[in-house]
Image (cartoon, helix red, strand yellow):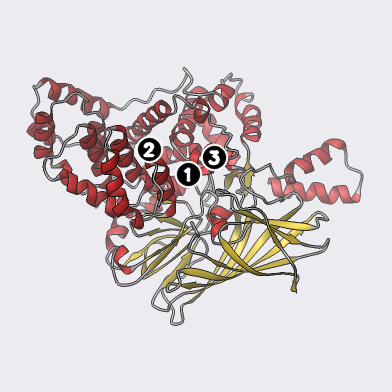
Amino acid sequence: MNTLKNSAFILIACLMVSCSTSQKEEMKEIIAYANDTHSYAKPNEAVAKHLLLNITVDFDKKNITGTATYTIESTNASEIVFDAKNLNIQKITVDGKEVKFSLGANDAVLGQSLSIPIEKNSKTVAITYETTDKTEALQFLNPQQTADKEHPFLLTQGQAILTRTWIPIQDSPQVRLTYTANVKVPKELLAIMSAENPKEKNENGQYSFEMKQPISPYLIALAVGDLVYKEISPRTGVYAEKSMIDKVHYEFADMEKMVKAAENLYGAYAWDQFDVVVLPPSFPFGGMENPRLTFATPTVIAGDRSLTSLIAHELAHSWSGNLVTNATWNDFWLNEGFTVYFEMRIMEALYGKEYANMLASIGRQDLAEEIEGFKNQPTATHLKLDLKGKNPDDGMNSIAYDKGYLFLRTLEETVGRENMDTFLKEYFNKHAFSTMTTEKFVVYLNKELLQKNKVDFNVNDWIYNPGIPANAAKIQSDKFQKVEEAIVNWEKGTLSEVDLCKKEWNIQQKIHFIRNIPAGISIEKFTALDTACNFSNATNSYIAMVWFEQTINHDYHANNVDAQIENFLMSVGRRWYVSTLYKAFKRNNKLEEAKRMYTKARPNYHSVTVNTIDEMLGVTF
């Protein structure tokens, strides 16, 4: 019996007979919401359960106008509180009757509280509003910023707390709700959402959507553009602009295999459809796991399916993140650490353990670099964070992803894979469509895995202390070891640059090689390497990013690499990629050069990327 059914049963029983103290405590624990310092909402008093969104997208005004109507539940509350940021609230009705509302003081990160008076039996709240030019979740792109360069484009990005900038909403991940939407767009464009989607345009530009399963607010997503759809299997497919669709379809041909591999591990896929839309290059993330419709960056379209672990990662979120969600952003590692672990298991199932270990080894290097960067902020390397007063985006780094993964991999090696898989499958099943705090997870872990298997494990050390515990799993890759041997021979001069570049290495091996080029290598050998391997003209975006970082580190300027870097920063908006290069400029005392390039590139970036780079470079516009 699942948790929601348990709570309903207990509630009915308590109405009929006198409940025991333990039953009352269990019911209270099940329905209670955690304290979320990143939301003004008070869901324990009054909470939204369903959203009906009626909106119009205006590309001329670059805004969205419409009404968000909520079905609500309350516990005799006199008001219901929503989150809003940089929105123009025009009118609010409660059960059809217009009411006076109040907006709280504006906070640069959180925005404003939107307080609406309600009565004991109030059922619906309708908020009429429009977005503004300060709405951070929305990015309106002109035709030149798209692949086909014929029509404009709109994309949204809600994670972590940006949904409140385009929909007034209780913007806490623990407030799960279903939604329906009616969206009006120019007739030459297609609208798609994180919901049941159309496969082709209609004549009037009016589209209706339904998300039947309750999701967290940050997962409500919208894309509008000149998009087409191509099926991979009856439940998987891809959207992209016309010039991209065949490349995207080829790149993601293994999507159905990934879904089956995931289901074999941890149970049935709960979202009916798994589609991916490849967005224009300004999209700030590699991917975003919006249910039924993953948003993806075009930087993964490499032509050889070498970067599709990103799709496995977003698919894994269908269990860890979308099905069982972090209750607050302090618990973000519960989303991402689990997802990286699941991603590696999917990749191992499809492509072998060595391939998965190469991916995990790269993540381990990222983690070491992140921890070094936080050497003066050790609490930032805890899995359980305290982000009160900070932007939750600050916690979205390698700690949550790669330390979280390492924790779970170490657990697996301690208790055995079979026990680990049984535990995780039950975890997803028992907590489906609910949210989880770190503290609740620790209780569940101790009871259902460690005690059952009579295993001692330093859980608190991993979660609540800095750095990496001594018992961390060791990740070994035979193919990476061969790369490291080649580096030694190249550095000694017994392996030439030409012979080095003839090696039949896969993308991960090439990345490992570039990232581990010795810091003291001469500029002559560096130039010879580039001439032999042509890294400065790499078409694979990941290789280009790690190579450009090394050229900055080594003060290398041959083979037109400076122009290539500038073009890369102008044409790619993926935050991880561009922040890596701007950080390298800053680290190597080339801040003015970074600012010059950033000034030109900034208009192409999404606000998520802009906020990060503004702070990194110390600039204001």
Farthest residue, direction right: 18
Please name whichever residue, 353 or 394, is drawn nearer the observer in this view of the structure: 394
Give percent across and percent down for residue 578: 32, 45
* Sequence-first tag of 3 and 2: 3
Q: Mark 3 or 2, which is nearer the eye?
A: 3
The residue to which callout 1 is attached is 264
- Measured Cα–Cα span from mark 1 to mark 2: 13 Å
Element under disc 1:
helix
Pointer 3: residues within 10 angstroms few (<14), some, or many (20+)? many
- Measured Cα–Cα span from mark 3 to mark 2: 25 Å
Which numbered disc covers residue 332? Answer: 3
Element under disc 2:
helix
The quarter of the displayed image where residue 187 is located = bottom left
Taking the image as drawn, is residue 509 in sight? yes
Query: At label 3, which amino acid type do we have?
Result: Phe
Query: At label 1, which amino acid type do we have?
Result: Asn
The quarter of the displayed image where residue 582 is located = top left
Give percent across and percent down for residue 236: 42, 59
